[in-house]
Structure formats: C-alpha cells, structure tokens
Image (cartoon, rainbow, N blue to C red):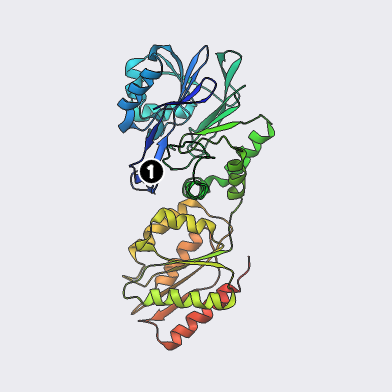
C-alpha cells in the first residue's frame, strides 16, 4: 500500500493493526499503530524513515514497486529507534552505498543497533538538502524529543513538516488523515502518547515548538511517524502540545490503589465519598492499579490536579503493583500536581511513609502525612476516611 500525500510526496509505510504492546511491554497499543515512511520523488529522490524490523521485507518489496530502489538518492533517518530504522538493513542490502542523513547521535544509535558502517552524512539544524525542482529539505534537530538523536525535516514549497515521533499517536487507521478519523479516539491516543512519552521533556517541547513557530514557516501538513497525517488545521496538535507541555491539568482527582482483602479498597471508596460531599464538580476517578492498564493510569495522572495513592502494608513496604507504577511515574517528572497516601495495615504499617517518600521523589507536592487504617476499617476509621476526603476536596492549587 502507498498513497500520494501532496504533489510528489508519497506515504510508503505500514499499518500495524495487530500490535498490542510496544517498546517491549512498556506501552499498550489498544488501537494498533502505524509506521509512517515517506518517499519524495522530485528530481532527486528522498526516503524519510522506514518501518519496524518485522515488516522490513514487506516494506522493501512495496517500496521497489513504487520506485526503482537505485533511483533513491537520499535516505533520511529522523530517529534511529527500531520502529523507524528497522528496515534499514534490508534496504541497505539492496542499495549499500546510498547516503543516510541523520544527526551525529543518530550515527551512534544506528551503528549501535546494526553494527554497519554505512555512508552516514551528519546534519545539524539549518542544514539543507536540495531535491531539485526548487525544493529543499531543511533539517531541525529535536534533541530529547524524545531521544538524543531525534530530528525533523521540512519540505519547502510543499510546506510539509516530517516530525517523526512528535505529534504522533499509536493509532491504526486506513483513513490516515486527521480529519477523517474519529476525533475522540484520535485525541485520546495523542494525549496518551504525550503523557507516557513526552512528559519528562515538556520544558524542551515548549522551547522547541516556540523556536519553530518563531521561524514563521508555513506548515500545510505535519507528517508524523505514527498514526494520522495532520492536514486539516495541522497546528491544532501543536497548540495541544503547548498546553500539555505547561504543567497540564484538568479538574480531576484520581484515586489509585491496590488491595489485599478489600480494606484499602474500602478506604478508597470512602475517601471518594468525602471528596464528593464537598466538591461535586471534580472529575473523580478510582482505579485498582493491579487491574488497570499502566499507560492508561499514567494518562489519568497526567490529567489530574491531585492523586491519592493507596496500598496496604506488606513486608514493611507496599504491594508490588503500586511499586511498579511508581517506576514509571518517577521517570515522567510530572509538575504542579498534589498527592496524598492511604492504606490499611495489620502489624507494622509503613505503607503510607513509603508512599509519601515515593511521591516526593516523583515530584509531587504531598498534601499531608496520609491516612492509615488498622485491619479492615471500622466505623471510626471510615469516618476518618470521609473527613480525609473532605479535606482533600478543600485543597486548592
Ligand atoms: Fe517511534 Fe521513538 O520511536
């Protein structure tokens, strides 16, 4: 499958309807994904990115139907992660001497993955590549958006920004354009992608977007490397990124917990009642961490102004599902969010101290010392949980 995007620019990627876990098991892809590769057929021919390794044979076979591979002049590798560079070995078997344009970090990464000394051409921000017909590719380094090697490139005259991972989403669709797909599905996947992948780099996202906007170059199309191509009001996703990059939050409180014999679950439900007694407008959500997709939890935290985290005490610590989600949370460096801890205990009762430490290390402002209940909460503990919830509801930003 391939299709024309504009003039001499074609999509030559792969739609992966089947994938449900990405980055090993780190990212759930409920709606599949796409690996977008682009072919520009001007006087000189450029290929931008490839596809994930399992599809490399299929990719090269399809590409050869689109163009005589020997006619490809330039290969652009915007980002060396395997989902985009994975077909390079198969392709370079066929055209081993063709130049690969990437950043200096891109060379390190591609060599690190494939152990090949291909014809690398290092580019920096502002470097250009002449495609003939008065069209050029202009390169823009996107360091840490989201890897040290990431870059984007811009096709003049056609006004297409090939942004690689930025502005993408894991979303398989045969429609392929932002205006043709279900908008709710699209933006759910966009936000999940930002929350789980780009949150730690928000300061850089804000800076880089403003730097590109200051250039005042016309952008008619944003061709990302995953999901839809933005052709209808493409800057709408840029504006979303600016909002998300600036300590984004909605009026949401999220209660996350795991439970052994339902005591901590009862605490969670009682605290939620207390919150709603005071604030009926807040979007209050409860999730059992062990039963919920971890990337969906991260998206809910991303939207929250307050999170409450509960675990009973076990072995002087917390339940493993709660510890696991903190391994993700702490790396994401959320900003401007408040938090508090709760949990049942039978003997020593350290869970809330452990949770408080984890919350502080993860950059949350901890509202209070938390609340714990002995064994399964009795009437007095239930009343305390209600009051705890009422106090949380009164917490302002
Ligand atoms: Fe889609 Fe960072 O790879």
Q: Does the residue labelled 1 lie within 8 Å of ligand 1?
A: no
Who is closer to the viewer here, 161 or 147?
161
Query: Which residue lies at the image location 47% right of the left edge and 42% below the top edge?
Result: 169
Of the 4 image quadrants, the one containing the N terminus is: top left
- Asked if residue 116 can be seen in this view, the reply is no
Residue 68 vertical position relative to residue 204 in the rendered view, above or below:
above
Residue 364 vertical position relative to residue 57 in the rendered view, above or below:
below
Residue 33 vertical position relative to residue 153 in the rendered view, above or below:
below
Residue 187 vertical position relative to residue 365 in the rendered view, above or below:
above
Q: Name the residue under label 1.
A: 32
* Quarter location, residue 378: bottom left
Whether residue 1 sits left or right of residue 134 in the image: it is left
- Asked if residue 24 can be seen in this view, the reply is yes
Residue extending furthest bottom? 379
SS for callout 1: loop
Dot 1 surroundings within 10 Å: few (below 14), some, or many (20 or more)?
Answer: many
The image shows residue 147 at horizontal and vertical percentages of: 47, 37
């Amino acid at each position: 499958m391939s299709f024309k995007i504009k003039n001499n620019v074609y999509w030559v990627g792969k739609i992966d309807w089947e994938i449900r876990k990405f980055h090993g098991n780190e990212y759930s892809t409920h709606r599949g994904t796409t690996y977008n590769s682009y072919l520009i057929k001007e006087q000189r021919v450029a290929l931008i990115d490839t596809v994930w390794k399992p599809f490399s044979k299929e990719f090269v076979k399809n590409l050869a139907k689109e163009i005589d591979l020997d006619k490809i002049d330039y290969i652009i590798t915007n980002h060396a992660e395997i989902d985009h560079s994975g077909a390079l070995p198969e392709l370079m078997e066929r055209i081993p001497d063709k130049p690969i344009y990437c950043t200096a970090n891109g060379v390190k990464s591609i060599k690190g993955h494939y152990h090949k000394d291909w014809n690398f051409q290092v580019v920096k921000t502002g470097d250009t590549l002449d495609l003939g017909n008065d069209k050029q590719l202009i390169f823009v380094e996107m360091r840490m958006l989201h890897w040290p090697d990431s870059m984007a490139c811009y096709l003049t005259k056609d006004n297409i920004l090939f942004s690689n991972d930025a502005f993408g989403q894991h979303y398989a669709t045969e429609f392929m354009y932002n205006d043709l797909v279900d908008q709710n599905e699209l933006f759910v996947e966009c936000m999940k992608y930002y929350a789980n992948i780009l949150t730690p780099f928000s300061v850089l996202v804000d800076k880089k977007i403003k730097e590109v906007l200051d250039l005042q170059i016309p952008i008619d199309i944003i061709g990302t490397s995953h999901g839809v191509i933005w052709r209808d009001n493409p800057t709408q996703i840029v504006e979303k990124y600016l909002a998300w990059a600036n300590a984004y939050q909605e009026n949401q409180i999220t209660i996350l917990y795991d439970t052994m014999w339902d005591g901590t679950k009862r605490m969670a439900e009682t605290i939620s009642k207390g919150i709603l007694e005071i604030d009926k407008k807040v979007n209050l959500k409860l999730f059992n961490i062990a039963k919920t997709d971890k990337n969906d939890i991260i998206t809910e935290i991303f939207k929250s102004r307050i999170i409450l985290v509960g675990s009973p005490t076990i072995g002087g610590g917390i339940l493993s599902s709660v510890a696991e989600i903190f391994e993700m949370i702490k790396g994401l460096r959320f900003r401007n969010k408040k938090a508090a801890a709760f949990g049942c205990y039978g003997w020593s009762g350290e869970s809330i101290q452990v949770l408080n430490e984890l919350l502080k290390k993860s950059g949350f402002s901890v509202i209070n010392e938390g609340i714990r209940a002995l064994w399964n909460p009795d009437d007095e503990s239930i009343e305390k949980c209600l009051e705890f919830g009422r106090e949380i509801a009164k917490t302002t930003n």
